[in-house]
Image (cartoon, rainbow, N blue to C red):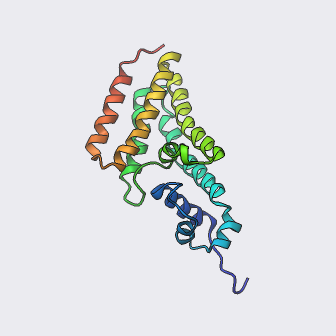
Amino acid sequence: MAGRKQFDMDTALDAAMIQFWRDGYADTSVDDLSRATGLNRSSLYSSLGAKDTLFLRCLDRYAARYGEKYDAALSGAASDPVVAVRAFFDVTLQRIADPELPDGCLIAQSAMAIPALSPSVAEHARQALGLQRLRLRAALKAGRLTDRDADAFAVHAAAVNQSLAVMSRAGASPAQLLAIVGVTVDALAQAPRA
């Protein structure tokens, strides 16, 4: 339609996601989102929703984008869970090393901000964080770890993965991050298989 500005929804959602990722939910204003997406406040609300709604869409987008990569990395866990878990961590390390992306992890950042989030947004952040543990547990069970070991390593690997995001944001070097991954992968290699 003549005189009406068009925009690409995926581009706008990616821009909003990066804004939330870079500054966190609490420190991202509607004006920040407007600048990031190129939409005025009215268009932002009508097209993408209120801040909470937009944040949830961005969190889901982030979880889906990286969830697919994590699933692909863990797909070989039945034949070699150690290689699969290393590949899982490689997804995170590659994301951290990408200069086009903010440091850290939107899910980790959101989990740390839970006290400042609305109850529904906080629950959504908890669920996004929990999906990573469930994904790891399923892969480790496929790799023939006992239920007890699969549970323990899934919780541990999910915590290590989130700590990589926090450590990268705090300035840890790639070598330090690799060393953290190495300790976890070495411990997993020692776990008995069922």
Residue 128 percent across, percent down from the top left: 57, 41
Residue most extreme to the bottom = 3
Residue 51 percent across, percent down from the top left: 62, 59
Residue beneath the point at 62% across and 41% down: 123
Q: Nearer the viewer, residue 123 or 93?
A: 123
The image shows residue 103, relative to residue 166, as above or below, that is below
Q: Nearer the viewer, residue 188 or 108?
A: 108
Numbered label tally: 0
The image shows residue 142, relative to residue 32, as above or below, that is above
The image shows residue 17, relative to residue 189, as above or below, that is below
- Answer yes or no: is residue 132 visible: yes
Residue beneath the point at 45% across and 15% down: 193
Name the quadrant containing residue 161.
top left
Q: Nearer the viewer, residue 127 or 63?
A: 127
Residue most extreme to the front = 116
Name the quadrant containing residue 5.
bottom right
- Answer yes or no: is residue 146 visible: no
Residue beneath the point at 53% across and 54% down: 25
Q: Is residue 146 left or right of residue 191?
A: right
Residue 104 percent across, percent down from the top left: 42, 49
Residue 132 percent across, percent down from the top left: 53, 36
Q: What is the quadrant of the N terminus in the image?
A: bottom right
Q: Is residue 107 left or right of residue 101?
A: right
The image shows residue 135, relative to residue 152, as above or below, that is below
Q: Nearer the viewer, residue 57 or 123?
A: 123
